[in-house]
Image: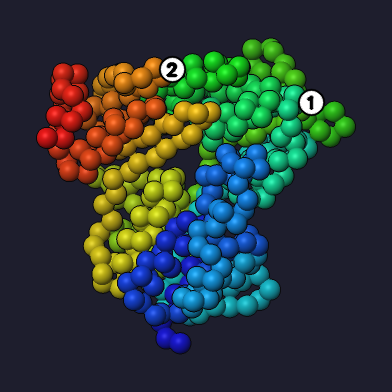
Amino acid sequence: MSDPIVIIGAGQAAAAFAGKLRALGSDRPVTIVGDEPVLPYQRPPLSKKYLVGEATFDRLLLKPPAWYEANAVTVLTGRKALAIDRTRRLVGLDGGEQLAYATLVLATGATPRRLPAVIGGDLEGIFTLRDKADADALMADFQPGRRLVVIGGGYIGLETAAVARTRGLEVSVVELADRILKRVAAAGTADLVRDLHRSHGVDILESAAIVRLVGADGRLAGAELSDGRTIAADLAVVGIGVAPNAGLAETAGLTVDDGIVVDAFGRTSDPDILAVGDCARFPYGDRLIRLESVQNAFDQGEAAAAALIGAGGAYAPQPWFWSDQYDAKLQIAGLHHGYDDTLLTDGPRPGSHAVWYFAAGAMIAVDALNFPAAFVTAKKLLEAGKHVSRLDVETRPLKELLA
């Protein structure tokens, strides 16, 4: 058993890395270490179909159990990696076991930020939604007629709000910034999504800070806001962002800066240690970025595996994302960072729109709400590196833009 590969973390990036190795014919020993008691699974359905019982957990598995046995990939579930000994190339696990590695892959993901206990963040009935255990805990409280406060107007919070409203809960979304989706989308997209939620009876409260969460017998009963209002609540979901799980890497002396810093091949400051997925910060143009998305976890995991065995080059992502809310689908192509102009266009049917982003006169991203043709067009244009101006989008049909 020579040149063993140890992967810490058992999410999308880890499964993609192991799968790509085997698809390319590598027979190096692979061990995946995951702290959850289950095999790697898809996370996006947790806040959607799984949460409301429309999808069983086995349908979320990234690979069937038989795949791991057939491909000689060992998965240690319910185990935690505690330390990395770079000199001896050993990973220390809980229970005292040590795993030797020739290549170590950090696919440790990210952890939801929580509200501090000093304002009531430790009350019963307050949830985050990141893994299966979170979804399982929330299910019991997700009952019609109950009052839910969603703290944070990002995609996770808004997706949870949509599912809750569909299930008959009374829902309020509390956002500290002056509008929802402040960090991830333009005002035009926020306007469309806000209107969507309000049309379904969700109360959207912007420029509203949580001063204190009020409890009764140790359980959440309400939320006091900075404007003096108090919202009654039976439960709350906190969606105020995540922090990369980089502590293990930092303790081991690797370069960490808002994530584990890697090069275009997934290599950390120690060339025998790679990092992929939500925990990794990698080169994109003239800057370093982290991408918290399924697309990045999958593509970066595969790219790093291919590069490791000399079967691929540098990772050059073309990011895309999606968000399902009610019967609406928001599809995003590209990154809007640095945009200086936007354009709203209407799709072929009511409720379909696209917000196009431009920087220095060139299209760099699109948010397409119920407008798949705009998403597909922008995605192909970005992948081809084609320059498209605002005037092009305003005056030419989508098919002509691709010509």
- Measuring 24% from the left and 27% from the top, which residue is drawn there? 358
Residue found farthest to the right? 217
> Is the residue under label 2 in contact with that under label 1 (CB below 8 Å)?
no
Residue found farthest to the bottom? 1
Residue 99 drawn at (x, y percent): 54, 78
Q: Residues within 10 Å of mark 2 (few under 14, many from 20)?
A: few
Residue 142 drawn at (x, y percent): 71, 34
As drawn, 112 above or below 87: above
* Residue 59, image quadrant: bottom right
Residue 88 drawn at (x, y percent): 48, 80
Residues 82 and 386: in front is 386
Residues 73 and 376: in front is 376
Residue 104 shows up from this direction = yes
The residue beneath circle 2 is 191
Residue 15 drawn at (x, y percent): 46, 62
Q: Residues within 10 Å of mark 1 (few under 14, many from 20)?
A: many
Residue 251 shows up from this direction = no
Question: Mark 2 belongs to which amino acid?
Answer: Asp
As drawn, 179 above or below 261: above
Instruction: Identify the element where label 1 is drawn.
Output: strand
Q: In the displayed structure, does residue 394 sit left or right of residue 315? A: left
Instruction: Identify the element where label 2 is drawn.
Output: helix
As drawn, 371 above or below 54: above
- Measuring 41% from the left and 19% from the top, which residue is drawn there? 351
Question: Mark 1 belongs to which amino acid?
Answer: Ala
Q: In the displayed structure, does residue 381 sit left or right of residue 66? A: left
* Residue 25, image quadrant: bottom left
Q: Residue 221, labelled with which disc?
A: 1
